[in-house]
Image: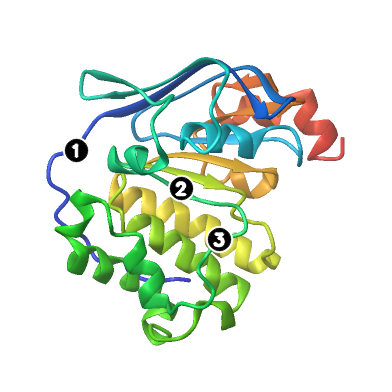
Amino acid sequence: MTSSIIRMSKGPILENRIVIDDIVAGYGPVQVLRGVSVHVEPGETVVLLGSNGNGKSTLINAIMGIVRPTAGSIILERDGQRIDLIGKAPEEIVGLGIAMVPEGRRLFPALTVEENLMLGAYRKDARAKITENLEFCLEAFPALRERYKQIAGNMSGGEQQMIAFARALMSAPSILLIDEPSVGLAPILVNRMIAKIAELKTHRNLTILMAEQNFNQAIKIADRGYIIVHGEIAFEGRNTEELKNNELIKQYYLGV
């Protein structure tokens, strides 16, 4: 996954901030999130740590409009504007410059790499820059250029993860939500993917919220983070050192 990413003309940089306050959400009668409050500042990489079933994916899905909260607020602060995301459809949220790399990739396996990437470019702001964004993605992930006409479902897990990232980048987002990027990948590929996320953030001026249970990998690129346990924020680390020294991290991730 190593490459020398080409630099692109980025235009004006929007100051995007997400503020999540006291969110309650779930699936039918099952309440998963119980008063979760999180904020992501412009240009940050914030990691949401927790084992499976504690609400990481539900929070990501709530931001994207896939799960509708029953209480609380999710606000996008964008260059002085406050935009309430609750009640907006996922395509409206993508239109505001927020993209998601979902857990498990969720590609269209019968379509080619090219077709999967083009589906990521339907946002109005992205359609005007398809050629530029595509070249950026193929430079970032050279294996996709080599397999551009290949059926996505026939590719390896690591290659499919590249497609999922590239598809999100094709929408020209300013905020990227990443749900469990290490799932299903060999350790060496996880290491490369985490490094690639850091590289992409720098070159695209991204603000990132990443849900991940692999603490040792996530901490390499995080500015700070949260630990979520049973649908509640159990700890907020203002920096990586606070996360490393937290008792929950020592118990569940570091084996102390």
SS of the residue under disc 3: loop
Name, please, the residue furthest toward the front.
28
User: Relative to 43, is 250 on the left or the right?
Assistant: right
The quadrant where residue 43 appears: top left
Q: Position of residue 242 (x, y in %)?
A: 63, 24
Q: Position of residue 101 (x, y in %)?
A: 49, 52
* Within-10-Å neighbours for mark 1: few <14, some 14–19, many 20+: few
Camera-side residue of 246 and 233: 233
Marks 1 and 3 sit apart, C-alpha to C-alpha, by 29 Å
Marks 2 and 3 sit apart, C-alpha to C-alpha, by 11 Å
SS of the residue under disc 2: strand
Select label 2 or label 3 by which is in front: 3
Camera-side residue of 239 and 100: 100
Residue at the disc numbered 2: 100
Residue 106's disc number: 3
Marks 3 and 1: in contact by CB < 8 Å? Answer: no
User: Relative to 208, is 83 on the left or the right?
Assistant: left
Three-letter amino acid code of the residue under disc 3? Arg
The quadrant where residue 229 appears: top right
The quadrant where residue 56 appears: top right
Select label 2 or label 1 by which is in front: 2
Three-letter amino acid code of the residue under disc 1? Ile
Three-letter amino acid code of the residue under disc 2? Met
Residue at the disc numbered 1: 13
